[in-house]
């Protein structure tokens, strides 16, 4: 168990170093994502998963040969699909000859957003980003469906419940957390609504916002967090975020333009681009934050629920 914890901490350090490398290479948006997701949320969720895992593995009564064959076949297809791709860093690659120059030279005139990364993700390829948001929403619904299934009593392992941890023992951490959480939330809103002009956007802001909720839960307990944060409202917000994003595209279609053509949202096409990007980034932030909170509460909540069930049986 100690070795596994060491590996997880090393992965978190690796994510933080990768974020530093991205900053040095002027890819600050990617650095934001790597720091918040790779070094932050991923490490935390893996630690929560370990707290739910026992020291012994249940014996496997079947051999998943079909699943192995599907994985090998799919992996082979993916590798085969990369054979026709240009070599990494090749200057003659189509993306360097046509796509990247178009974005760099024309995005300011067409979109009017100083951050080219935001222009690409939220306008030029908004449909792809919409697919990513739908994938995140689907993942959250999948976790919600899987972890809501009742478990047997013998599945309960010897674990340290989050509700009996630091929040009852360390007063300094509680005081410092109360001071930090408002600033974390404020920074999340800054990243959300300043993504047009600087590094940031809905993905990064949603994860940062969720991290503040995670910190509150770890320090004050799952029971307190559940009283403060309405889970039904969080699930509703996850769907609202996706619907808000998709509704912007529907409005474009109803006005006779292409899907996610924001120029119809205002009399000035550039102002319409600004409004459309603001709305879809808001949808992304709401969905990402809600899904992260749903995943965390369902993982960590199982610990408390199983412990309470054992106490009732006893």
Image (cartoon, rainbow, N blue to C red):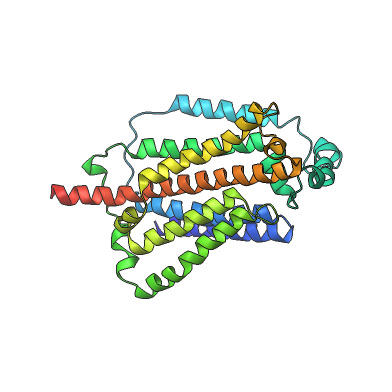
**72 is higher (above) or lower (below) than 311:** above
Left or right of 99: which side holds 217?
left
Q: Residue at x 34, y 66 (%)?
A: 166
| Residue 107 seen in the current view | yes
User: Furthest-left residue in view?
Assistant: 314
Query: Residue 244: where, in percent of width, then height?
Result: 54, 38
| Residue 14 seen in the current view | no
Query: Residue 71: where, in percent of width, then height?
Result: 53, 29
Q: Nearer the viewer, residue 126 or 243?
A: 243
Left or right of 146: which side holds 18?
right
Left or right of 195: which side holds 109?
right
Query: Residue 55: where, in percent of width, then height?
Result: 33, 51
User: Furthest-bottom residue in view?
Assistant: 172
Q: How many marks?
A: 0
Q: Nearer the viewer, residue 112 or 176?
A: 112
Q: Choose top left, top right, bottom left or bottom right for residue 61.
A: top left
């Amino acid at each position: 168990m100690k070795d596994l914890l060491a590996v997880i901490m090393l992965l978190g350090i690796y994510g933080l170093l990768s974020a530093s490398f991205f900053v040095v290479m002027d890819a600050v948006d990617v650095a934001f994502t790597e720091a918040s997701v790779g070094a932050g949320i991923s490490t935390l969720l893996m630690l929560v998963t370990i707290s739910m895992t026992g020291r012994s593995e249940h014996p496997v009564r079947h051999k998943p040969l079909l699943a192995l064959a599907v994985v090998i076949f799919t992996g082979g297809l993916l590798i085969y699909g990369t054979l026709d791709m240009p070599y990494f860093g090749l200057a003659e690659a189509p993306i360097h000859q046509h796509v990247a120059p178009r974005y760099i030279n024309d995005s300011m005139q067409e979109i009017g957003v100083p951050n080219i990364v935001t222009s690409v993700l939220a306008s030029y390829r908004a449909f792809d980003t919409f697919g990513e948001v739908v994938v995140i929403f689907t993942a959250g619904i999948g976790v919600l469906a899987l972890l809501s299934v009742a478990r047997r009593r013998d599945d309960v392992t010897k674990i340290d419940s989050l509700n009996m941890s630091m929040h009852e023992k360390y007063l300094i951490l509680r005081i410092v957390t109360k001071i930090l959480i408002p600033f974390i939330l404020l920074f999340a809103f800054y990243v959300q609504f300043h993504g047009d002009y600087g590094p940031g956007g809905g993905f990064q802001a949603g994860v940062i916002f969720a991290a503040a909720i995670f910190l509150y839960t770890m320090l004050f307990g799952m029971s307190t967090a559940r009283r403060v944060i309405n889970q039904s409202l969080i699930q509703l917000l996850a769907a609202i975020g996706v619907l808000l994003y998709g509704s912007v595209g529907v409005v474009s279609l109803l006005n006779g333009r292409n899907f996610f053509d924001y120029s119809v949202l205002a009399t000035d096409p550039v102002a319409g681009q600004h409004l459309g990007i603001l709305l879809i980034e808001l949808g992304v932030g709401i969905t990402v934050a809600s899904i992260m909170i749903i995943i965390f509460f369902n993982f960590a909540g199982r610990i408390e629920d199983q412990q309470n069930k054992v106490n009732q049986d006893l």
